[in-house]
Image (spheres, coloured by chain):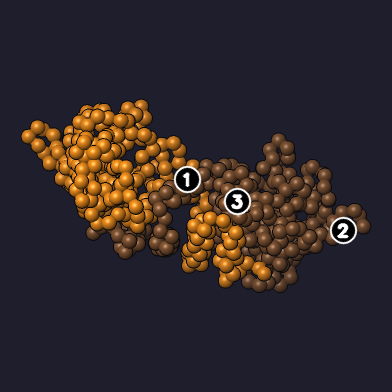
Chain colours: A orange, B brown
């Protein structure tokens, strides 16, 4: 029987029926249905199909060891944040948010109190907090992986030769009471990379590319669910229109000027027990 | 307001409201809805999301000047054929089918009667026909672009150094009565490329990678809709399970043994008037 608009979806789903992994079978047959529904609704011309192929190819060719344009694509369509939300813990754990495309290198191990700012210009600050279980029990030895853009809005991997590798990154181990603290520069808001296909997409759709100022965190402890999140700087622009939809109110933190001439941000992290 | 599972789709669609091109706005807002529906139904884990990002990146990195893995991805999910079907002409024009990923180089101009088989082994054949309007009016000077795999099942671009460039390809101009004829080798069925991510996908989903034997055609004439199609060899295996869903019964042609020791295939092409 010929492949027609009416028989197409069943024919493709049928072809996947010998998939041995039931989860993979569910994913590919469900993806087939949604892809075909999208195509039947939009009714792309052959020229539009060709433009879509070119766009995806350009996204792929923009990915390298230090750049992940497909993560950006997922981010700007809210897919990353939707998946983060679906997988989020209960209300007592710290809210998660997107991983983003810049967690591509291993953060250097640093001692509590060290700075992750290897340049030293800009407004300095100290970030401190405690990692606990949701019932408040301190998690001694919890690991906190942090990474951020500079006060000019760039990650180290975006400026090789300008920033030293590992600038703005640190892997810290909490003390025996779950406490951590480190020094850094107050990060700037910044545009996601606009020189590739995602930047062109944002331009064509009248969207700005900016993210509010933030520091990325991944906090983990044995026996607990790892949380991937950000601390957002409370006086940053774009908190209401993050290009990747990642802001949660619970993650917006005041960076308070102190008598010591630097700013201070407090961010406690609560982890759910692993299931 | 925080981004939640319930508010996600509206928030992303709202971000696209300043898109100046109304068709692009329709595409991105509709794509957002279908992407989010897929995600809400499948509820991917973060690990599965990471695997999807890796898969798409590998597809992009497999694309180069002579290979188009995103076209293959579109093909094996039946998306290419669905779009071809949606854009197909009325019942009187020759049925279209997928372009496929191998129309990547310009076909060399050849004279009517020339062979496109620059190797000369295998079962030889002659393909002939007439290009007309749907009312039967011959289309003098119609252009027929043909390309095919060898009797071993490979396109020239897949075997640089083994096949001469342009082997299996030809650009012909019909005579003043719309007639064309050329010589070639009877093509073989073949697997779509299995050494990349799409091959791994087919393997993981228990699908074979084979396409029935065929010759690609693009026929065009001024004032008429161009048709992209295939001639399928009637005694080929896999006519019932083409990996890219491209077989239409109207395109299956007998390659009839002749007294002259070669096989003969007749394929007339009818084009719709351009709108």
Badge 2 density bin: few <14, some 14–19, many ≥20, Cα 10 Å:
some
Mark 3 highlights which residue? B203
Q: Position of residue B202 (x, y in %)?
A: 59, 52
Q: Is residue B245 left or right of residue A205?
A: right
| Res B125 seen here | yes
Image x and y of residue A259, in percent: 7, 34
Q: Nearer the viewer, residue B246 or B172?
A: B246
Which-is-in-front pick, marks 3 and 1? 3
Q: Is residue A193 above or below residue B37?
A: above
User: Do the dots labelled 3 and 1 sit on one chain?
Assistant: yes
For mark 3, name the chain: B
Identify the image quadrant of the N terminus of chain A.
Answer: bottom right
- Residues at marks 3 and 1, CA–CA distance in whole angstroms: 17 Å
**Residue A133 horizontal side relative to residue B41, left or right:** left
B124 or B210: nearer the eye?
B210
Q: Position of residue A27 (x, y in %)?
A: 49, 58
Is there CB contact under 8 Å for labels 1 and 2? no
Outermost residue on the right side: it is: B259
Q: Which residue has dot 2 on it?
A: B257
| Mark closer to the observer (2, 3) | 3
């Amino acid at each position: 029987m010929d492949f027609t608009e009416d028989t197409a979806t069943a024919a493709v789903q049928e072809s996947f029926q010998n998939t041995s992994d039931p989860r993979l079978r569910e994913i590919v047959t469900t993806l087939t249905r949604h892809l075909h529904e999208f195509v039947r609704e939009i009714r792309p011309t052959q020229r539009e199909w060709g433009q879509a192929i070119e766009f995806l190819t350009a996204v792929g060719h923009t990915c390298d060891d230090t750049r992940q344009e497909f993560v950006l694509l997922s981010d700007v369509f809210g897919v990353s944040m939707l998946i983060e939300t679906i997988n989020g813990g209960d209300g007592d754990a710290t809210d998660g948010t997107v991983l983003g495309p810049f967690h591509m290198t291993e953060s250097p191990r640093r001692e509590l109190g060290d700075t992750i700012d290897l340049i030293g210009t800009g407004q300095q600050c100290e970030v401190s907090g405690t990692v606990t279980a949701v019932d408040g029990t301190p998690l001694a030895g919890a690991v906190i992986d942090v990474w951020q853009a500079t006060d000019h809005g760039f990650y180290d991997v975006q400026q090789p030769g300008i920033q030293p590798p590992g600038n703005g990154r640190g892997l810290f181990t909490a003390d025996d009471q779950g406490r951590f603290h480190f020094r850094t520069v107050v990060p700037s808001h910044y545009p996601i990379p606009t020189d590739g296909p995602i930047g062109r997409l944002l331009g064509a759709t009248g969207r700005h590319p900016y993210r509010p100022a933030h520091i990325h965190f991944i906090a983990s402890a044995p026996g607990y669910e790892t949380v991937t999140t950000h601390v957002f700087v409370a006086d940053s622009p774009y908190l209401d229109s993050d290009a990747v939809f990642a802001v949660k109110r619970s993650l917006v933190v005041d960076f308070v000027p102190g008598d010591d001439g630097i700013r201070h941000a407090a961010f406690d992290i609560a982890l759910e027990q692993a299931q």
